């Protein structure tokens, strides 16, 4: 059963990455893998502490698979996306989740905003590191336009996390009735 | 248990990134990615009253448009005697200030790093920056890291139909802010007019001379500067989906 679930996650991560790269109507900067990762973490964070262990394994596996596929289709040397996703998941799970309650949409939005920023910062850091170590031939260029696009992407991703969360919340509520 | 999982992960990573296991994904996903990326808005909106007819019509139009693009590609490529490979764009992404397009041809079609890619009118759209066995990565001209040796051809020369190399002005073309093109390192005393043509100079190892890039749109001269800044209006089709990669001799 565990294997089947992992296989399902494998294909889900693959579909999300293909959608992210090849779907022409997706706005620039939307990261589907990271959005679904945040949703999983928020869902896990709403459970009591002792019940989180089981889903945690699948979240880490999903982060690894998503990172792997993003790395395969990316320009950067392998490892940039895997490490950025895994470190973000670790930070959220070990440091943030034990001290935070998701009791409003605003808290979810701020949570998404903050960790989107961390995720993008980590990608930039690892790309910079690969450039310094000679694995990447091109320099990282940070200018006001890049910052503007990144900011826009962070807000868009956070809004999408809230939207998906609202949809799940609404579906659950309708089901109960 | 943990040790075996760790070893399994290490084995998977080594297989994918060191022993070219990633080719499995490239080969199996290329057709799907190509289909997804080539979707256009008119198709997605064509679902109402006579749905089937409209879909058929849209698909015929799509084939016609693709056919036209391919014919145009062939026209200029045969005229200029370029050795080329046609490649479809199957994806694009921008991350950490990098922009790239994923093409469905790679080392198997003799594509290598540094080659130029042109649209259906023969206008430069970017250059290849990374090549895998079955896919390659294209950096568009607008990327801030893009730089290329170019020549500006004076409009007077074109009118009089004269060939005079001394009046051709050389410079370095760079993408700026991900949206405009600028030519740098052109001395202040050189006379350039708005509308002058910009072409590749052929100084780069794998890019031939004479590929059209755009026209001069703006000239910025500052009295104390050593060089003038020239803004270029690119002539490329912004919605390019198929490119010709010009192979080196």
Image (cartoon, rainbow, N blue to C red):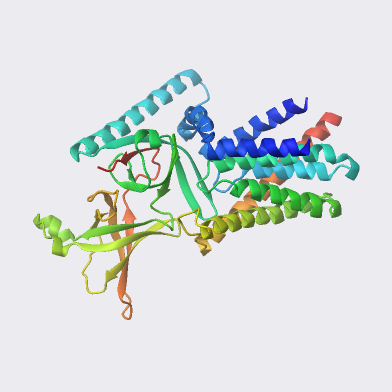
Please count the marks in the image: 0
The residue located at (42%, 24%) in the rendering is: B59
Looking at the image, residue B242 lies above or below residue A91: above
Would you say residue B220 is visible in this rendering? Answer: no
- State which quadrant residue A4 falls in: top right
- State which quadrant residue B224 falls in: bottom left
Q: Nearer the viewer, residue B183 or B179?
A: B183
The residue located at (40%, 49%) in the rendering is: B140
Left or right: B130 in relation to A38: left
Would you say residue B21 is visible in this rendering? Answer: yes
Place of residue A132 in the rendered image (x, y in percent of width and height, measured from the top left)? 53, 60
Left or right: B38 in relation to A20: left
Q: Quadrant of the N terminus of chain A?
A: top right
Q: Quadrant of the C terminus of chain A?
A: top right
Q: Nearer the viewer, residue A175 or A155?
A: A155
Place of residue A127 in the rendered image (x, y in percent of width and height, measured from the top left)? 56, 55
Place of residue A167 in the rendered image (x, y in percent of width and height, measured from the top left)? 74, 38
Left or right: B106 in relation to B206: right
The residue located at (24%, 37%) in the rendering is: B77
Farthest residue, direction bottom = B224
- State which quadrant residue B145 falls in: bottom left
Q: Nearer the viewer, residue B240 or A52?
A: A52
Looking at the image, residue A31 lies above or below residue B53: below
The residue located at (73%, 48%) in the rendering is: A89
């Amino acid at each position: 059963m565990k294997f089947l679930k992992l296989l399902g996650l494998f294909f889900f991560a693959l579909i999300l990455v293909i959608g992210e790269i090849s779907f022409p109507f997706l706005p620039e900067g939307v990261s589907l893998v990271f959005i679904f990762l945040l949703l999983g973490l928020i869902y896990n964070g709403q459970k009591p502490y002792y019940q989180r262990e089981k889903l945690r394994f699948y979240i880490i596996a999903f982060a690894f698979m998503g990172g792997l596929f993003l790395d395969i289709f990316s320009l950067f040397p392998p490892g940039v996306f895997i490490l950025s996703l895994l470190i973000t998941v670790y930070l959220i799970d070990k440091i943030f989740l034990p001290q935070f309650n998701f009791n409003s949409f605003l808290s979810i939005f701020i949570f998404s905003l903050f960790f989107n920023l961390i995720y993008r910062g980590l990608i930039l850091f690892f790309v910079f590191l690969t450039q310094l170590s000679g694995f990447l031939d091109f320099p990282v260029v940070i200018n006001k336009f890049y910052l503007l696009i990144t900011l826009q992407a962070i807000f868009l991703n956070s809004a999408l996390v809230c939207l998906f969360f609202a949809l799940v919340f609404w579906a659950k509520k309708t089901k109960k009735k | 248990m943990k040790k075996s999982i760790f070893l399994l992960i290490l084995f998977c990573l080594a297989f994918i990134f060191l022993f070219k296991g990633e080719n499995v994904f490239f080969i199996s996903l290329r057709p799907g990615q190509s289909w997804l990326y080539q979707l256009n808005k008119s198709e997605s909106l064509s679902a109402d009253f006579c749905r089937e007819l409209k879909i058929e019509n849209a698909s015929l139009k799509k084939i016609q448009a693709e056919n036209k693009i391919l014919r145009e590609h062939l026209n200029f490529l045969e005229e200029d005697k370029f050795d080329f490979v046609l490649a479809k764009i199957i994806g694009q992404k921008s991350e950490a200030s990098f922009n790239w397009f994923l093409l469905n041809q790679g080392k198997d079609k003799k594509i290598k790093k540094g080659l130029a890619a042109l649209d259906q009118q023969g206008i430069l759209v970017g250059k290849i920056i990374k090549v895998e066995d079955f896919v390659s990565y294209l950096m568009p001209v607008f990327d801030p890291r893009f730089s290329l040796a170019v020549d500006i051809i004076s409009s007077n020369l074109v009118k009089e139909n004269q060939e005079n190399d001394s009046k051709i002005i050389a410079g370095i073309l760079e993408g700026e802010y991900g949206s405009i093109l600028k030519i740098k390192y052109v001395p202040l005393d050189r006379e350039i007019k708005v509308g002058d043509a910009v072409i590749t100079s052929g100084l780069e190892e794998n890019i031939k001379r004479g590929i059209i890039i755009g026209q001069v749109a703006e000239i910025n001269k500052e009295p104390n500067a050593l060089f003038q800044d020239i803004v270029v209006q690119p002539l490329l089709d912004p919605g390019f989906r198929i490119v010709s990669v010009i192979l080196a001799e």
